[in-house]
Image (cartoon, rainbow, N blue to C red):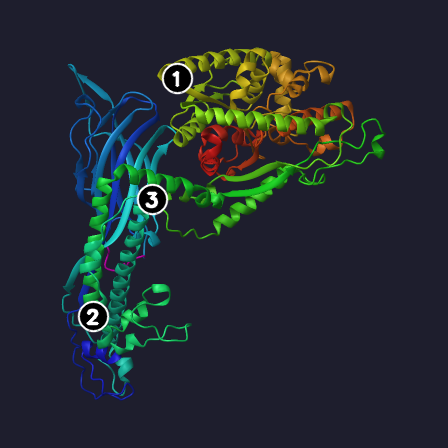
């Protein structure tokens, strides 16, 4: 090998390296023109559908796409190489304008402008645009990631006579970037949902397909290195600097060529595996007869092995025996073996495998054109299935037992004789749960900052752009603990007997209902009601709503307006208004669904923020809601004070509540702080906890944040706290009774497989700065409304709860 390289750069291999040269000036080393093997990255982007979730402005919109190498901001920019409209758009001539465009100044592609008029509007774009990214001179395959950039351009509508036209080319409204990691550049086929941001909530269904392709082989220009004059008595290896540099350059080129040949081999195998996966996934046969019959490289490989004995008997380190042929361990090609091949053999393999990749790539593109709908759905399903694993970096899962009930040793005994009993899942009394949750999340955040995320999936830069700034979600699945003893508290007596009887009844009813449902054909009516908090707006929860719509586009949603600007009064009045609003909406949707076909089932879900959760529970306690309780499905509580403000540790916030009560006489604040009646057992909250407002839900998800100073941590999680556990006064007894009432509803056997999850959301507070909102704990409370990443994590990790 060294002799061949020495021959390339003009060395005489018979001259020993330690032999001294004469005093004559050395002649310039002549270098033969090197053969350069060229490859290119082709990235095909299918833009299938533009779905308007929540754009605030009507007008003309278009998508602009650019891409570049991550390590080179300026010079290495991908250029569109081909564009194809593979299906006619579904918009009329009045709602589309102009043509798609390629801009040579920034190598961008832009779709035709299309007009958005209303929410949930679908625009089928059906465009394929392929970009070519050439490898730079110093880059090889797998050396850099690719940044894929989507821009949303907006133009207002200008009325010109009876026509509506865009005012200009459009101004940038929002940007969403993705990163294709180096490992994925040899082959990637992925669904890529483009969301943009909270102010431009859309869903663009995009699929991205990446392949490494052969461009060709060419001869580089001859270069004669300048060799400096060497001093007499110098050693050859130390004097001919130019020749040494040439030797290094040729060796480097040789390694790069071997790497490129191996990359094409890997790209070919990846395409074969992906084609088989697509065929099996959509139950379609892909014809590869021509590939297997005319592109078999066995003869060529045999001839190469015979001409290069070193490769035929090369030993792979760590294996202890020679490898027969070019394949390394597990059928993989070893770059070290390729380096031993001659230039001609490398070129032959490069051309052969390059042609195979091109054939398979074109086969895939044709197959995609014929089965585009099935392939997009297949890729989307695969993407959704991988979300929990992909986002597990920021999520911590645990499973705990729900204590049978929270009790003190005996309420009537002197306090110094009482020993507090706790369930096995509760934290120690000497620790503050909120502080422990914060510490746990911060430790996890620090570990993420030191983590190297290097996978083969396309990465959403809204999440992966700053991994340490993403919320940490600690999910705690709570399961019922087995009963050990029968409680002496009246509402728990005879519970075991009731449990067995009710369970058998529910099972029998469930069997008959399931058999009846199976016999019936029809569709489900899914309704989700979103309820804002104190002095809130009906659109406060739109980000959570949008994420729910992404999971299930068939849901009907009600953004409650019944209590807008009316959240300072009595909770009973607010609950009654919400109940009437919900009933009217459900009846309207039921009538419409019945007219369009057989209505099989109704799923009624609720999402509340802050005191909106109390309004929801109050509405469910109204007698007019009783016929609809059997339809309850999923309940999501975002920082709801379910146990009121007893034992609130935020003294500054408590002072603000006191001022509201004194200066404005806000009734709901009196109810939240248990000052609406001298007897705590006659207060609104105590009576609400006795009402069975939770037991009919099939799924209950409680979201809390230890950084939220507006709602007590234990109240949002419906659990005990340190202060209550050591309080043996009448207030402490009443609090534990309220807590047990709520827990018993969640434990109730009215639902056979109820899911109960507590989620701690820990936001990155470093971006808040030092201000009043951070100081009083309001920032985290409002972050539930201004961020949707935590909702994305939870909903896509457990989609069955939201379908």
Residue identified by numbered label 1: 593
State which tag comes first along the sequence, 3 or 1: 3
Q: Secondary structure at mark 2?
A: helix
Q: Which residue was labeled with disc 2?
A: 345
Q: Along the horizontal axis of the image, is 489 left or right of 355?
A: right
Query: Of the numbered discs in the image, which one, if any, rests on residue 64?
Result: none
Name the residue located 44 percent from the left edge and 35 percent from the top edge.
792
Q: Is residue 141 magenta?
A: yes
Q: CA distance from mark 3 to mark 2?
A: 38 Å
Camera sees residue 188: yes
Is 30 placed above or below 234 here?
Answer: above
Q: How many marks?
A: 3
Label disc, if present, on residue 281 of the rendered structure: 3
Closer to the camera, 491 or 243?
Answer: 491
Q: Over which residues does the magenta segment extend?
A: 135-142
Mark nearest the camera among 3 and 2 is: 3
Front disc: 1 or 2:
1
CA separation, marks 3 and 1?
33 Å
């Amino acid at each position: 090998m060294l002799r061949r390289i020495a021959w390339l750069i003009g060395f005489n291999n018979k001259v020993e390296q330690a032999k001294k040269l004469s005093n004559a000036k050395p002649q310039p080393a002549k270098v033969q023109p090197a053969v350069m093997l060229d490859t290119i990255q082709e990235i095909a982007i299918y833009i299938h559908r533009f779905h308007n979730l929540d754009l605030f402005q009507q007008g003309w919109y278009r998508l602009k796409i650019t891409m570049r190498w991550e390590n080179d901001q300026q010079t290495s920019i991908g250029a569109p190489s081909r564009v194809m409209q593979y299906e006619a758009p579904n918009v009329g001539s009045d709602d589309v304008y102009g043509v798609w465009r390629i801009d040579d100044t920034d190598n961008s592609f832009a779709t035709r402008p299309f007009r958005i008029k209303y929410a949930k509007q679908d625009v089928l774009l059906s465009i394929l645009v392929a970009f070519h990214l050439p490898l730079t001179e110093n880059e090889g395959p797998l050396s850099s990631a690719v940044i894929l950039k989507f821009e949303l351009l907006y133009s207002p509508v200008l009325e010109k006579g009876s026509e509506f036209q865009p005012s200009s080319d459009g101004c940038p409204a929002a940007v969403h970037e993705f990163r294709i990691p180096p490992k994925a550049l040899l082959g990637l086929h992925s669904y890529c949902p483009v969301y943009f941001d909270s102010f431009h909530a859309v869903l663009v269904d995009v699929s991205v397909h990446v392949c490494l392709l052969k461009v060709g082989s060419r001869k580089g220009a001859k270069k004669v290195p300048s060799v400096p004059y060497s001093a007499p008595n110098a050693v050859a290896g130390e004097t001919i600097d130019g020749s040494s540099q040439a030797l290094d350059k040729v060796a480097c080129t040789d390694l790069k060529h071997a790497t490129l040949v191996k990359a094409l081999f890997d790209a070919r195998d990846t395409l074969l595996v992906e084609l088989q996966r697509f065929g099996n996934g959509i139950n379609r046969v892909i014809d590869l007869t021509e590939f297997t019959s005319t592109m078999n490289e066995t003869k060529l490989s045999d001839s190469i092995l015979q001409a290069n004995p070193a490769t035929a008997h090369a030993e792979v380190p760590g294996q202890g025996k020679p490898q027969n042929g070019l394949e390394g361990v597990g059928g993989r090609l070893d770059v070290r073996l390729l380096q031993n091949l001659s230039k001609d053999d490398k070129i032959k393999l490069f051309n052969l495998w390059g042609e195979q990749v091109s054939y398979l790539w074109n086969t895939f593109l044709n197959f995609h054109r014929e089965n585009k709908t099935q392939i997009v759905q297949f890729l989307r399903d695969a993407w959704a299935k991988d979300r929990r694993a992909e986002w597990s970096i920021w999520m911590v899962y645990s499973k705990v037992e729900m204590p049978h009930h929270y009790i003190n040793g005996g309420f009537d005994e002197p306090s110094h004789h009482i020993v507090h009993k706790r369930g096995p899942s509760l934290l120690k009394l000497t620790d503050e749960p909120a502080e422990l949750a914060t510490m746990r999340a911060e430790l996890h955040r620090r570990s993420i900052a030191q983590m190297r995320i290097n996978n083969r999936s396309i990465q959403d830069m809204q999440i992966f752009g700053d991994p340490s700034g993403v919320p940490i979600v600690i999910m705690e699945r709570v399961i019922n603990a087995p009963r050990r003893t029968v409680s002496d508290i009246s509402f728990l007596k005879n519970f075991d007997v009731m449990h067995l009887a009710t369970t058998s009844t529910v099972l029998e009813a469930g069997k008959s209902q399931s058999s009846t449902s199976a016999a019936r054909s029809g569709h489900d009516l899914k309704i989700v009601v979103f309820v804002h908090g104190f002095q809130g707006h009906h659109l406060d929860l739109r980000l959570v709503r949008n994420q729910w719509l992404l999971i299930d586009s068939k849901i009907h949603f009600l953004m409650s307006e019944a209590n807008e600007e009316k959240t300072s009064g009595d909770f009973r009045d607010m609950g009654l208004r919400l109940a009437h609003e919900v009933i009217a909406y459900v009846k309207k949707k039921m009538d419409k669904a019945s007219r369009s076909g057989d209505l099989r089932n109704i799923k009624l879900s609720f999402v509340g923020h802050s005191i909106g959760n109390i309004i929801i529970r109050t509405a469910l306690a109204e007698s007019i809601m009783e016929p609809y309780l059997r339809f309850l499905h999923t309940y999501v509580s975002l920082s709801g004070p379910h146990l009121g403000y007893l034992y609130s540790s935020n003294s500054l916030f408590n002072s603000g509540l006191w001022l509201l009560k004194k200066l404005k006489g806000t009734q709901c604040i009196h109810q939240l702080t248990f000052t609406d009646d001298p007897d705590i057992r006659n207060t609104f909250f105590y009576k609400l906890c006795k009402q069975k407002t939770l037991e009919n839900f099939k799924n209950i998800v409680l979201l809390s944040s230890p950084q939220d100073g507006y709602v007590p941590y234990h109240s949002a999680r419906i659990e005990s706290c340190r202060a209550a556990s050591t309080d043996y006064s009448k207030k402490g007894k009443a609090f534990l009774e309220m807590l047990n009432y709520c827990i018993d509803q969640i434990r109730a056997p009215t639902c056979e497989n109820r899911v109960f999850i507590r989620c701690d959301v820990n936001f990155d507070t470093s971006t808040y700065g030092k201000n009043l909102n951070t100081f009083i704990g309001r920032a985290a409370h409002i972050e539930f409304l201004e961020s949707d990443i935590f909702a994305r994590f939870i909903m896509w990790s457990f989609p069955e709860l939201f379908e």
